[in-house]
């Protein structure tokens, strides 16, 4: 059954569908969801959108050097990637660590899509463990764990709420006479949202995106049972609430409007880095933009290169081309013991 037919069935039976469920079904439905559907390239030149690891291995080099600055003497490492997609980032990190004579003793990937699991399996002769939940991560050695993600949190569904006369209503999708439209529904969690985001003065029609799915993942990271780790995550997002919808639809590298198309569309949200930072505040997290991540961590032979290709790659993976209305590519990192060095 197509995504549109599945969405229509839900709307017919209960009158509407909320934005989080709509995005979760569109992205992750077992048969027709964008991330599971077979035979459709998803990420890369021939896919629907591009990501930094797919542009060049210089991205993985910068990320690994960010880790190595914190653990300069490390000899044995476990890798844990959240949302690896085609798996290129982990393979590049693995080879880069190997080139520095650092042993990679375990590689674990949190991946929900069977399509990507198959793809990674096909492509690599390196051994991976797949997990579906972070709390399933078990490691039987004391090696430092390097945990990383790129454009992982932006693929996770968020609910959308609209402020109206002192309350938040939830935004939902409904359909009548073959036309889709947005409606507002009152919600019990309005007061909880007002408390949680109390530093903001909301005005009528301001939009708030909030994801308990992301909060659950953050709790799982917080509860990770390993001796020593470094966590770094890069995503497109913001450090102040934009108070508008950040939902983006991409198909064949083009932006679409909501309801333009239902099949083979990638849905993503801007990521709330303020929430991430507040969540891990006891670990002293550091937020930098992706340009600084690249410029602070790539070797000078690349940064100072006059080679046109390298210059173009660095410009692309710095992410600045994609800055848009308060949203930029950002990176948040911390160490388990909260002792990350300031730049
Ligand atoms: C936008 S893609 C990014 C892929 C890759 N990191 C890259 O930069 O090319 C998002 C990835 O996160 C995975 N993902 C999203 N939500 C997930 C979840 N709740 N659990 C596991 N994987 C998830 C998707 O299947 C996909 O591999």
Image (tube, rainbow, N blue to C red):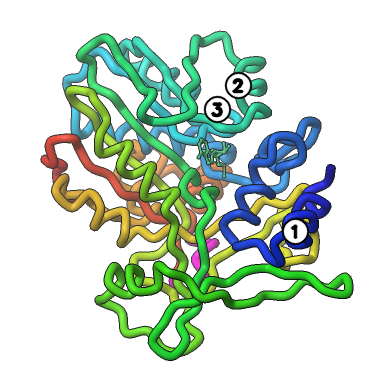
Residue 202 in magenta stretch: no
- Left or right of 284? Residue 188 is right
Q: Residue at x 13, y 41 (%)?
A: 338
Tally of marks: 3
Is disc 1 placed on a helix, strand or loop?
helix
Eye-nearest disc, 3 or 1 = 1
Percent x, y for residue 300?
A: 34, 39
Can you say whether 194 is above or below 221 in the image? below
Magenta-colored span? 320-326
Marks 2 and 1, how far apart at CA: 38 Å
Residue 322 in magenta stretch: yes
Residue under numbered circle 1: 13
Eye-nearest disc, 2 or 1 = 1
The answer to whether mark 2 and mark 3 are in CB contact below 8 A is yes
Examine the image and state in which quarter residue 191 appears: bottom left
Is disc 2 placed on a helix, strand or loop?
helix
Q: Residue at x 53, y 30 (%)?
A: 111
Residue under numbered circle 2: 120
Q: Residue furthest front?
A: 13
The answer to whether mark 2 and mark 1 are in CB contact below 8 A is no
Marks 3 and 1, how far apart at CA: 39 Å
Asked if residue 246 can be seen in this view, the reply is yes
Q: Residue at x 78, y 36 (%)?
A: 40
The disc label shown at residue 127, or none: none
Residue under numbered circle 3: 87
Can you say whether 49 is above or below 116 in the image? below
């Amino acid at each position: 059954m197509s995504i549109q037919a599945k969405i229509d069935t839900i709307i017919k039976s209960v009158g509407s569908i909320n934005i989080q469920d709509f995005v979760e079904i569109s992205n992750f439905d077992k048969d027709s969801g964008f991330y599971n559907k077979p035979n459709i390239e998803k990420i890369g030149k021939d896919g629907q959108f591009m990501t930094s690891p797919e542009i060049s291995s210089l991205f993985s080099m910068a990320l690994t050097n960010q880790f190595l600055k914190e653990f300069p003497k490390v000899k044995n490492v476990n890798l844990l990637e959240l949302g690896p997609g085609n798996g290129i980032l982990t393979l590049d990190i693995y080879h880069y660590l190997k080139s520095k004579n650092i042993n990679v003793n375990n590689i674990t990937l949190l991946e929900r899509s069977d399509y990507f699991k198959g793809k990674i399996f096909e492509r690599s002769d390196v051994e991976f463990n797949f997990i579906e939940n972070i709390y399933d991560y078990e490691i039987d050695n004391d090696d430092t764990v390097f945990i990383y993600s790129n454009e992982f949190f932006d693929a996770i569904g968020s609910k959308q709420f609209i402020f109206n006369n002192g309350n938040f209503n939830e935004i939902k999708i409904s359909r009548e006479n073959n036309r889709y439209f947005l409606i507002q529904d009152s919600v019990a969690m309005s007061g909880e949202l007002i408390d949680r985001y109390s530093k903001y003065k909301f005005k009528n029609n301001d939009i708030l995106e909030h994801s308990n799915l992301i909060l659950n993942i953050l709790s799982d990271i917080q509860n990770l049972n390993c001796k020593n780790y470094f966590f770094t995550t890069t995503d497109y997002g913001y450090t102040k609430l934009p108070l508008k919808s950040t939902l983006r639809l991409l198909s064949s590298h083009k932006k679409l409007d909501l309801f333009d198309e239902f099949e083979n569309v990638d849905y993503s949200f801007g990521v709330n880095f303020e929430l991430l930072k507040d969540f891990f505040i006891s670990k002293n997290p550091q937020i930098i933009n992706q340009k600084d991540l690249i410029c602070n961590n790539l070797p000078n032979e690349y940064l100072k290169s006059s080679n046109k290709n390298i210059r173009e790659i660095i410009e692309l993976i710095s992410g600045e081309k994609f800055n848009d209305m308060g949203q930029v590519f950002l990176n948040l990192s911390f160490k388990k013991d909260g002792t990350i060095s300031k730049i």
